[in-house]
Amino acid sequence: MNAILFLAHTDGQGALPKSALETLTAAAEMAQATGAALHVGLFGADVASAANAVAGCGAAKFFGVADSALALPRYTSDAAAAEALCKASGAEFVLAPATSRVSRFLPGVAHRLGGAADTFCTAITVDDGKPVVTRWYYRQRMKANITREQKPWLVTVGGGCYAAYEGAAGEAALETVSLDMPASKTEAKTIEAPSSDTQTIRPEAEMLLVAGAGWTKKQAGQSRVDEAESLILGFLDKTQASLGSSKSLVDLSGEGQAVLNFLTHLHQVGQTGATPRHPKGLATCCHGEEPHVVGWRFVNERRAINLDPGCGWAHGKADVLYVADAFEVMQEVNKLLAG
Protein backbone atom coordinates (compact mmCIF):
# COMPACT_ATOMS: atom_id res chain seq x y z
CA MET A 1 0.00 0.00 0.00
CA ASN A 2 1.56 3.28 -1.12
CA ALA A 3 -0.47 5.71 1.00
CA ILE A 4 -3.58 6.10 3.13
CA LEU A 5 -5.70 9.20 2.60
CA PHE A 6 -7.81 10.65 5.39
CA LEU A 7 -10.60 12.51 3.56
CA ALA A 8 -12.92 14.88 5.40
CA HIS A 9 -14.92 18.09 5.12
CA THR A 10 -14.85 21.00 7.53
CA ASP A 11 -17.92 22.32 9.33
CA GLY A 12 -19.42 25.81 9.35
CA GLN A 13 -16.68 27.05 11.70
CA GLY A 14 -13.87 25.65 9.59
CA ALA A 15 -13.15 22.82 12.04
CA LEU A 16 -13.33 19.05 11.72
CA PRO A 17 -16.38 17.33 13.27
CA LYS A 18 -15.82 14.75 15.97
CA SER A 19 -16.56 11.84 13.63
CA ALA A 20 -13.78 13.08 11.34
CA LEU A 21 -11.29 13.17 14.22
CA GLU A 22 -12.28 9.60 15.06
CA THR A 23 -11.62 8.56 11.47
CA LEU A 24 -8.23 10.29 11.59
CA THR A 25 -7.32 8.06 14.52
CA ALA A 26 -8.23 5.01 12.44
CA ALA A 27 -6.19 6.28 9.48
CA ALA A 28 -3.14 7.00 11.64
CA GLU A 29 -3.32 3.53 13.21
CA MET A 30 -3.57 1.95 9.75
CA ALA A 31 -0.60 3.92 8.47
CA GLN A 32 1.47 2.79 11.43
CA ALA A 33 0.42 -0.84 11.06
CA THR A 34 1.11 -1.02 7.33
CA GLY A 35 4.07 1.33 7.04
CA ALA A 36 2.20 3.35 4.41
CA ALA A 37 2.40 7.12 4.26
CA LEU A 38 -0.49 9.04 5.81
CA HIS A 39 -2.03 11.81 3.72
CA VAL A 40 -4.71 14.28 4.83
CA GLY A 41 -7.21 15.66 2.33
CA LEU A 42 -9.65 18.37 3.44
CA PHE A 43 -12.31 20.36 1.63
CA GLY A 44 -14.64 23.17 2.68
CA ALA A 45 -14.96 26.93 2.66
CA ASP A 46 -11.77 27.14 4.74
CA VAL A 47 -9.40 24.24 5.45
CA ALA A 48 -6.21 25.88 6.72
CA SER A 49 -7.23 26.06 10.38
CA ALA A 50 -8.47 22.45 10.33
CA ALA A 51 -5.19 21.29 8.80
CA ASN A 52 -3.20 23.16 11.45
CA ALA A 53 -5.33 21.59 14.18
CA VAL A 54 -4.22 18.09 13.13
CA ALA A 55 -0.69 18.99 12.04
CA GLY A 56 0.77 16.64 14.63
CA CYS A 57 -0.98 13.52 13.32
CA GLY A 58 2.13 12.34 11.48
CA ALA A 59 0.84 12.92 7.95
CA ALA A 60 3.46 13.15 5.22
CA LYS A 61 1.29 15.42 3.07
CA PHE A 62 -1.67 17.75 3.55
CA PHE A 63 -3.97 18.53 0.61
CA GLY A 64 -6.79 21.05 0.62
CA VAL A 65 -9.58 22.31 -1.59
CA ALA A 66 -11.04 25.58 -0.29
CA ASP A 67 -13.93 27.37 -1.95
CA SER A 68 -16.98 29.25 -0.71
CA ALA A 69 -19.12 26.90 -2.81
CA LEU A 70 -18.05 24.08 -0.45
CA ALA A 71 -19.43 25.77 2.64
CA LEU A 72 -22.70 23.87 2.30
CA PRO A 73 -23.16 20.26 1.14
CA ARG A 74 -23.91 19.73 -2.53
CA TYR A 75 -23.27 16.51 -4.42
CA THR A 76 -21.75 18.09 -7.53
CA SER A 77 -19.17 20.24 -5.77
CA ASP A 78 -18.43 17.78 -2.95
CA ALA A 79 -17.84 14.90 -5.36
CA ALA A 80 -15.56 17.03 -7.53
CA ALA A 81 -13.51 18.15 -4.52
CA ALA A 82 -13.19 14.61 -3.14
CA GLU A 83 -12.18 13.26 -6.56
CA ALA A 84 -9.51 15.95 -6.92
CA LEU A 85 -8.08 15.19 -3.48
CA CYS A 86 -7.95 11.45 -4.13
CA LYS A 87 -6.13 12.02 -7.43
CA ALA A 88 -3.67 14.48 -5.87
CA SER A 89 -2.84 12.01 -3.11
CA GLY A 90 -2.72 8.93 -5.30
CA ALA A 91 -3.57 6.84 -2.21
CA GLU A 92 -4.86 3.31 -2.71
CA PHE A 93 -6.85 3.34 0.54
CA VAL A 94 -9.12 6.24 1.54
CA LEU A 95 -10.81 6.65 4.92
CA ALA A 96 -13.60 9.17 5.50
CA PRO A 97 -16.15 9.74 8.30
CA ALA A 98 -19.62 8.30 7.72
CA THR A 99 -21.36 11.67 7.89
CA SER A 100 -24.49 12.23 5.86
CA ARG A 101 -22.52 14.60 3.64
CA VAL A 102 -19.77 12.09 2.83
CA SER A 103 -22.16 9.16 2.49
CA ARG A 104 -24.03 11.05 -0.21
CA PHE A 105 -21.13 11.36 -2.65
CA LEU A 106 -18.50 8.74 -1.76
CA PRO A 107 -19.85 5.82 -3.86
CA GLY A 108 -20.04 8.12 -6.88
CA VAL A 109 -16.43 9.20 -6.38
CA ALA A 110 -15.32 5.57 -6.13
CA HIS A 111 -17.01 4.89 -9.47
CA ARG A 112 -15.30 7.87 -11.11
CA LEU A 113 -11.92 6.64 -9.90
CA GLY A 114 -12.56 3.05 -10.99
CA GLY A 115 -12.36 1.88 -7.39
CA ALA A 116 -14.67 0.42 -4.76
CA ALA A 117 -16.54 1.79 -1.76
CA ASP A 118 -17.73 0.34 1.57
CA THR A 119 -19.74 2.38 4.04
CA PHE A 120 -20.38 2.51 7.79
CA CYS A 121 -17.50 0.23 8.72
CA THR A 122 -16.83 -0.29 12.42
CA ALA A 123 -13.24 -1.52 12.54
CA ILE A 124 -10.17 -1.83 10.32
CA THR A 125 -7.36 -4.30 10.91
CA VAL A 126 -4.34 -5.48 8.93
CA ASP A 127 -3.76 -9.01 7.67
CA ASP A 128 -0.57 -9.79 5.77
CA GLY A 129 -0.04 -6.10 5.13
CA LYS A 130 -3.52 -5.60 3.66
CA PRO A 131 -6.46 -3.77 5.24
CA VAL A 132 -9.42 -5.81 6.47
CA VAL A 133 -12.62 -3.86 7.03
CA THR A 134 -15.35 -4.97 9.45
CA ARG A 135 -18.91 -4.21 8.48
CA TRP A 136 -22.25 -5.27 10.02
CA TYR A 137 -25.21 -6.46 7.96
CA TYR A 138 -28.85 -7.36 8.55
CA ARG A 139 -29.29 -4.80 11.31
CA GLN A 140 -26.15 -5.79 13.21
CA ARG A 141 -26.94 -9.51 13.25
CA MET A 142 -24.18 -10.51 10.82
CA LYS A 143 -20.59 -9.30 10.79
CA ALA A 144 -18.35 -9.49 7.72
CA ASN A 145 -14.61 -8.97 7.33
CA ILE A 146 -13.95 -7.54 3.87
CA THR A 147 -10.84 -7.28 1.72
CA ARG A 148 -10.71 -5.87 -1.81
CA GLU A 149 -8.21 -5.91 -4.64
CA GLN A 150 -9.86 -2.99 -6.43
CA LYS A 151 -8.01 0.30 -6.01
CA PRO A 152 -8.58 2.90 -4.76
CA TRP A 153 -10.70 1.52 -1.95
CA LEU A 154 -12.86 4.20 -0.31
CA VAL A 155 -14.24 3.41 3.15
CA THR A 156 -16.39 5.40 5.57
CA VAL A 157 -16.03 4.79 9.31
CA GLY A 158 -19.05 4.86 11.61
CA GLY A 159 -19.08 7.34 14.48
CA GLY A 160 -18.09 6.17 17.95
CA CYS A 161 -15.85 3.33 16.77
CA TYR A 162 -12.53 5.06 17.49
CA ALA A 163 -11.32 7.64 19.98
CA ALA A 164 -11.18 11.16 18.56
CA TYR A 165 -7.72 12.45 17.61
CA GLU A 166 -6.26 14.68 20.34
CA GLY A 167 -2.75 15.30 19.04
CA ALA A 168 -0.83 18.53 19.03
CA ALA A 169 -1.68 21.38 16.68
CA GLY A 170 0.92 23.11 14.54
CA GLU A 171 1.43 24.59 11.11
CA ALA A 172 0.66 22.14 8.33
CA ALA A 173 2.42 22.39 4.96
CA LEU A 174 -0.86 22.55 3.07
CA GLU A 175 -0.79 21.86 -0.66
CA THR A 176 -3.67 23.63 -2.41
CA VAL A 177 -5.45 21.47 -4.97
CA SER A 178 -6.98 23.51 -7.78
CA LEU A 179 -10.52 22.74 -8.83
CA ASP A 180 -12.76 24.16 -11.51
CA MET A 181 -16.00 24.24 -9.56
CA PRO A 182 -18.68 22.50 -11.64
CA ALA A 183 -21.73 24.51 -12.58
CA SER A 184 -25.06 23.64 -11.05
CA LYS A 185 -28.66 24.56 -11.76
CA THR A 186 -29.31 24.91 -8.05
CA GLU A 187 -27.59 26.92 -5.37
CA ALA A 188 -27.66 26.28 -1.64
CA LYS A 189 -28.27 29.55 0.19
CA THR A 190 -28.34 28.47 3.82
CA ILE A 191 -29.38 25.71 6.20
CA GLU A 192 -32.34 26.19 8.51
CA ALA A 193 -32.11 24.07 11.62
CA PRO A 194 -34.04 24.04 14.89
CA SER A 195 -32.43 25.79 17.83
CA SER A 196 -30.43 23.64 20.20
CA ASP A 197 -33.13 23.77 22.87
CA THR A 198 -35.73 22.22 20.53
CA GLN A 199 -33.45 19.66 18.87
CA THR A 200 -33.83 16.27 20.55
CA ILE A 201 -31.65 14.13 18.25
CA ARG A 202 -28.09 14.77 19.41
CA PRO A 203 -25.56 12.29 17.99
CA GLU A 204 -22.70 13.79 20.01
CA ALA A 205 -24.52 13.53 23.37
CA GLU A 206 -23.01 11.41 26.13
CA MET A 207 -26.34 9.72 26.83
CA LEU A 208 -29.30 8.32 24.91
CA LEU A 209 -32.80 8.13 26.40
CA VAL A 210 -35.04 5.64 24.59
CA ALA A 211 -38.80 5.97 25.11
CA GLY A 212 -41.10 2.99 24.65
CA ALA A 213 -44.81 2.58 24.13
CA GLY A 214 -45.40 2.16 27.86
CA TRP A 215 -45.32 5.94 28.28
CA THR A 216 -48.70 6.20 26.52
CA LYS A 217 -50.43 3.16 28.04
CA LYS A 218 -53.45 3.79 30.23
CA GLN A 219 -52.92 3.70 33.97
CA ALA A 220 -55.92 3.67 36.30
CA GLY A 221 -58.14 4.01 33.23
CA GLN A 222 -56.46 7.01 31.64
CA SER A 223 -53.34 7.86 29.68
CA ARG A 224 -50.75 10.32 30.97
CA VAL A 225 -49.28 11.54 27.69
CA ASP A 226 -48.98 15.20 28.75
CA GLU A 227 -47.14 14.22 31.91
CA ALA A 228 -44.89 11.87 29.93
CA GLU A 229 -43.97 14.65 27.53
CA SER A 230 -43.13 16.98 30.40
CA LEU A 231 -40.93 14.41 32.15
CA ILE A 232 -39.03 13.39 29.04
CA LEU A 233 -38.45 16.93 27.76
CA GLY A 234 -37.47 18.06 31.24
CA PHE A 235 -34.84 15.34 31.43
CA LEU A 236 -33.51 16.13 27.96
CA ASP A 237 -33.32 19.83 28.76
CA LYS A 238 -31.38 19.29 31.98
CA THR A 239 -28.98 16.65 30.65
CA GLN A 240 -28.75 17.55 26.94
CA ALA A 241 -29.18 13.84 26.25
CA SER A 242 -30.33 12.53 22.88
CA LEU A 243 -33.79 11.02 22.40
CA GLY A 244 -34.62 7.72 20.74
CA SER A 245 -37.87 5.80 20.44
CA SER A 246 -39.07 2.28 19.87
CA LYS A 247 -40.91 1.55 16.62
CA SER A 248 -44.08 0.66 18.52
CA LEU A 249 -44.24 4.14 20.04
CA VAL A 250 -43.74 6.17 16.86
CA ASP A 251 -46.24 3.93 15.04
CA LEU A 252 -49.03 4.77 17.50
CA SER A 253 -49.87 7.99 15.66
CA GLY A 254 -50.90 5.98 12.61
CA GLU A 255 -53.22 3.90 14.76
CA GLY A 256 -55.14 6.90 16.05
CA GLN A 257 -53.73 6.57 19.58
CA ALA A 258 -52.23 9.24 21.77
CA VAL A 259 -48.54 9.74 21.07
CA LEU A 260 -45.73 12.03 22.21
CA ASN A 261 -45.96 15.09 19.95
CA PHE A 262 -42.23 15.59 19.51
CA LEU A 263 -41.48 12.06 18.25
CA THR A 264 -40.94 11.20 14.58
CA HIS A 265 -39.64 8.15 12.74
CA LEU A 266 -36.22 9.84 12.74
CA HIS A 267 -36.07 9.03 16.47
CA GLN A 268 -36.62 5.33 15.85
CA VAL A 269 -33.96 3.07 17.36
CA GLY A 270 -33.94 -0.68 16.84
CA GLN A 271 -34.03 -3.36 14.21
CA THR A 272 -35.71 -1.05 11.68
CA GLY A 273 -34.29 2.21 13.01
CA ALA A 274 -30.98 3.85 13.85
CA THR A 275 -27.92 2.27 15.46
CA PRO A 276 -26.63 4.82 17.99
CA ARG A 277 -23.21 4.68 19.65
CA HIS A 278 -23.61 6.87 22.72
CA PRO A 279 -21.46 6.03 25.77
CA LYS A 280 -24.57 5.52 27.94
CA GLY A 281 -28.18 4.57 27.28
CA LEU A 282 -31.36 4.43 29.35
CA ALA A 283 -34.40 2.55 28.01
CA THR A 284 -37.75 3.53 29.53
CA CYS A 285 -40.94 1.54 29.03
CA CYS A 286 -39.37 -0.69 26.35
CA HIS A 287 -39.84 -4.44 26.71
CA GLY A 288 -36.20 -5.22 25.87
CA GLU A 289 -36.69 -7.90 23.25
CA GLU A 290 -34.32 -8.42 20.33
CA PRO A 291 -35.83 -5.83 17.91
CA HIS A 292 -35.09 -3.14 20.51
CA VAL A 293 -31.68 -4.35 21.61
CA VAL A 294 -30.20 -4.95 18.17
CA GLY A 295 -30.50 -1.27 17.30
CA TRP A 296 -28.38 0.03 20.16
CA ARG A 297 -26.05 -2.84 20.89
CA PHE A 298 -23.06 -0.50 20.43
CA VAL A 299 -24.08 1.70 23.38
CA ASN A 300 -21.39 1.01 25.96
CA GLU A 301 -23.47 1.08 29.17
CA ARG A 302 -27.16 0.16 28.98
CA ARG A 303 -29.70 0.59 31.74
CA ALA A 304 -33.46 0.13 31.64
CA ILE A 305 -36.63 0.90 33.60
CA ASN A 306 -39.50 -1.57 33.37
CA LEU A 307 -42.29 -2.74 35.67
CA ASP A 308 -41.88 -6.35 34.50
CA PRO A 309 -39.01 -8.15 36.31
CA GLY A 310 -39.09 -10.83 33.63
CA CYS A 311 -38.79 -8.51 30.62
CA GLY A 312 -36.12 -8.91 27.98
CA TRP A 313 -33.80 -6.48 29.74
CA ALA A 314 -33.62 -8.86 32.72
CA HIS A 315 -32.17 -11.61 30.55
CA GLY A 316 -28.75 -10.16 29.92
CA LYS A 317 -29.88 -7.36 27.63
CA ALA A 318 -29.04 -4.52 30.04
CA ASP A 319 -26.25 -3.88 32.53
CA VAL A 320 -28.77 -2.66 35.12
CA LEU A 321 -32.57 -3.10 35.24
CA TYR A 322 -34.67 -0.90 37.53
CA VAL A 323 -37.97 -2.67 38.26
CA ALA A 324 -40.05 0.45 38.83
CA ASP A 325 -42.58 2.88 37.38
CA ALA A 326 -40.81 5.09 34.83
CA PHE A 327 -43.05 8.06 35.74
CA GLU A 328 -41.97 7.89 39.39
CA VAL A 329 -38.32 7.32 38.56
CA MET A 330 -38.06 10.19 36.09
CA GLN A 331 -39.89 12.54 38.46
CA GLU A 332 -37.26 11.89 41.11
CA VAL A 333 -34.41 12.10 38.61
CA ASN A 334 -35.60 15.48 37.34
CA LYS A 335 -35.90 16.74 40.92
CA LEU A 336 -32.31 15.71 41.61
CA LEU A 337 -31.11 17.34 38.41
CA ALA A 338 -32.95 20.56 39.26
CA GLY A 339 -31.43 20.62 42.73
Image (cartoon, rainbow, N blue to C red):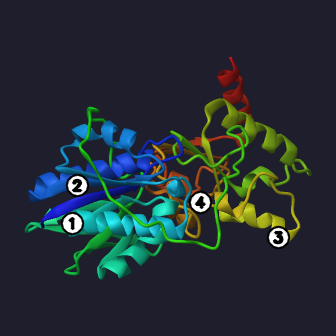
In the rendered structure, find residue 337 and report the number of the disc placed on it.
none
The CA distance from mark 2 to mark 4 is: 36 Å
In the rendered structure, find residue 39 and report the number of the disc placed on it.
2
Secondary structure under tag 2 reads strand
Compared to 310, does 173 lie above or below?
Answer: above
Residue that sits furthest to the top in the current view: 339
Mark 4: give few (<14), some (14-19) or many (20+) Cα within 10 Å: many
Which of pointers 4 and 3 lies earlier in the amino acid sequence?
3
Compared to 139, does 267 lie above or below?
Answer: above
Residue found 56% across the figure and 56% down from its top: 72
Residue closest to the eye, 311 or 275? 275
Q: What residue type is labelled 4?
A: Val
The residue at which mark 4 appears reads as 269
Which of pointers 4 and 1 lies earlier in the amino acid sequence?
1
Mark 3: give few (<14), some (14-19) or many (20+) Cα within 10 Å: few
Q: Which amino acid does label 3 sit on?
A: Gly
Secondary structure under tag 4 reads loop
- Quarter of the picture containing the N terminus is bottom left
The residue at which mark 1 appears reads as 91
Residue closest to the eye, 62 or 224? 62
Residue found 41% across the figure and 70% down from its top: 106
Which of pointers 1 and 3 lies earlier in the amino acid sequence?
1
Q: Quadrant of residue 141 in the image?
A: bottom left
The CA distance from mark 1 to mark 2 is: 8 Å
Q: What residue type is labelled 2?
A: His
The residue at which mark 3 appears reads as 254
- Quarter of the picture containing the C terminus is top right
CB within 8 Å, label 4 to label 1: no
